[in-house]
Image (spheres, rainbow, N blue to C red):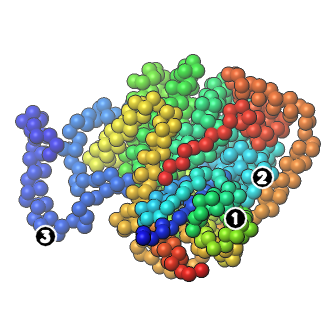
Amino acid sequence: MPEKKIRVLIAKPGLDGHDRGAKVIARALRDAGMEVIYTGLRQTPEMIASAAAQEDVDVIGLSILSGAHNTLCPQLMKLLHEKGMDDLTVLVGGIIPEADIPALKQSGIAEIFLPGTSTQDIIDFIHKRQAQPR
Amino acid sequence: MKDSSNSQKPDHLADACSRLRAWEKITLEPVLAKNPERQKQFTTVSSYPVRRLYTQDDLANWDPVRDLGFPGVPPYTRGIHATMHRGRLWTMRQFAGFGTAEDTNQRFRYLLSQGQTGLSTAFDLPTLMGYDSDHALSEGEVGKCGVAISSLADMEVLFDQIPLADVTTSMTINSPAAVIWAMYLAVAEKQGADWKKVSGTLQNDILKEYIAQKEYIYPPEPSMRLVIDTFEFGIKHTPKFNVISISGYHIREAGSTAIQELAFTLRDGMEYVEWAIRRALPVDEFAPQLSFFFNAHNDFFEEIAKYRAARRIWYKAMTERYKSVNPRSWALRFHTQTAGCSLTAQQPMNNVVRTAIQALAGVLGGTQSLHTNSLDEAWALPTEFAATIALRTQQIIAHETGVTNTVDPLGGSYFVEALTNEVENGAWDYIRRIDAMGGMVKAIEKSYPQREIAEASYRYQMAVDKKEKIIVGVNDFVTPEKPLEILQIDETVAHRQAERLHKLRAERHTAEVERRLAALRKASKGSENLMPFIFDAVKVYATLGEICEAMRTVFGPYEEVAIT
């Protein structure tokens, strides 16, 4: 039986329209054999949480370059918790000051990928994480 | 050899050709046999192939009279002014904006006190999307990427003690450009400045929003109507104002190649011209108020070739396609910003060096104004420390390097002229393809430029991941490092803005605001120029969100087809 494909939701929360990173990651993960759903722009945390539930994804990748991460990420994590989706892996990529990283991880974000990260590092991280029993 | 008909060449060219063959045979071949070159193929940052050596042979069909000419005259390859930077240096215009209007007003006045010669305003995302600071969707975004402006009251604070009659200001705003411009003109009016003399630049380039930056509100048709409304208003009331800055910057930042940046930007420019002509505006009345904005990326010569080709293409388009007879419509004036996307979070001090080299390309390419990015760009908005180094970088280029002593110092270089030709030809290929689709709005609806850019950006990332392209400090020469001190914008900005809006709504003449918003809604349904209606609403302190919403109820929102 073929191995079940990892399902990933790539989402752009907030008002930011800079989608270069989100699109590159979506394509790189797809080329690496994952099922990728891209939400498109300007998604509220509510929209992202319900898309994740509906699409039954294993991973959510958020791309944020606007500086709104400290507001948007905790909101999404709270919603996922309320929906009983704590086992989901949530990743963030974008312009994130280092000082903000500990609080984001505290809120349940599995990893934060900063500018300059290679797509292979993100692919490897997802594979490793999904292989871990949780 | 591209041309084998040596017999038909003038003697000196035939001689040069045979000397080149002799050099290849006698000198080059043994060297290559002993020491092969580092790579099989050498390419620009846009993956455009670059040959080993450029000679006369690469300029076989190049005519220095037709293709190069002199500065200040067609085809403007060498620059749009006869004396270029000997006569007047470019405007040093650092893009700034964060927090509240007070915060940014302070940064503006600091930059002016440090020798900056023009202002450039960055607005926050809610403002760019036409939402007031207290809108639900603004949560977490207020004052983060730029300054929060929700009404004329904020605009008055933003330009407090800055004389708009003397200082030129650029405003990076697109979908709500007409509204922000109306606020700016209202402040100028209050300061007693003569609109006929007020000068500055409105970005107002909605096409590149659909293509690249994605900060759109309405669908293309009504958006284009608003843009042409500002053209018409500008001709009548503000002849010195650049009503649009047709921008390649964001197209490049989204991952395009240099040729794509050039082609899509100039085809956008042609689209605006065509829509304005369809409105029966005479080309030579509005075209002198059009300006351009390009990126300055890492590949030095490719960028210089791009600027030179841009001027040549625009001249040809204006005279051949649009039958312009006014030389002021022919000369492509442009602003340059160094490439934010080229800056690294790793070893951020290296970004000072990248920015300096990119800025030098802009200067050698004949820019009219320049923004140099700050070293901390990949982390946050710049601190005052970082913004000062960025400004100093321009001052060093202007006053210490000597590159401004002569006009177009690279003119006549085999490589630069050949690359200028090739970049121009590449751009025309794209332009003709878009013509065949029925123009840029149609091409955007087919996602054509979006797809081309996504392809290029993916190819580039793969090349970086495979180390085919080296980025110092990122995929090579990596060292451990300490965190950088950066600018933090806290949530008190949002609270202060919310309070100010609350007070404004309580104190203004509500019935008059409602009446003028209703008039705008009604006019939006017809075909009148909307600028006077927007101006009327702005003056009684209708907010940006209210004005944009009034038009949104008529025009509807725009949703793109997301491609990955």
Q: Which quadrant would residue B549 be assigned to in this image?
A: top right
Tell me the kind of residue under disc 1.
Leu
Residue that carries the numbered disc 3 in the rendered image: B34
Looking at the rendered structure, the kind of residue marked 3 is: Lys
SS assignment at label 3: helix
Left or right: where does residue A52 sit relative to residue B63?
A: right
Asked if badge 2 and badge 1 are on a common chain, one would say no
User: Which residue is at 34% across, 47% downward?
Assistant: B410
Is residue B135 in view from this perspective? Answer: yes
Residue B225 found in image quarter:
top right
Residue ID at (31%, 43%): B422
**Chain letter, disc 3 residue:** B
Q: Nearer the viewer, mark 2 or mark 3?
A: 2
Q: Quick one: label 2, few (<14), some, or many (20+) residues within 10 Å?
A: few
Q: Chain of mark 1?
A: A
Q: Are marks 2 and 3 on the same chain?
A: yes
- Tell me the tag on residue B6: none
Q: Secondary structure at mark 2?
A: helix
The correct choice, above or below, for B502 with respect to B37 in the image is: above
Cα separation between marks 1 and 3: 61 Å
Same-chain check, marks 1 and 3? no
Per the image, the residue denoted by label 1 is A76
Name the residue that disc number 2 marks: B136
Front residue (pair B329, B475): B475
In three-dimensional space, the C-alpha distance between marks 2 and 3, rounded to whole angstroms, equals 68 Å
Mark 2 belongs to which amino acid? Ala
- The answer to whether residue A116 shows anywhere in this view is no
Q: Position of residue B470 (x, y in %)?
A: 38, 67
Residue B61 occupies quadrant? top left
Q: Residue B480: image x %, image y %?
A: 51, 80
Q: Position of residue A10 (x, y in %)?
A: 56, 60
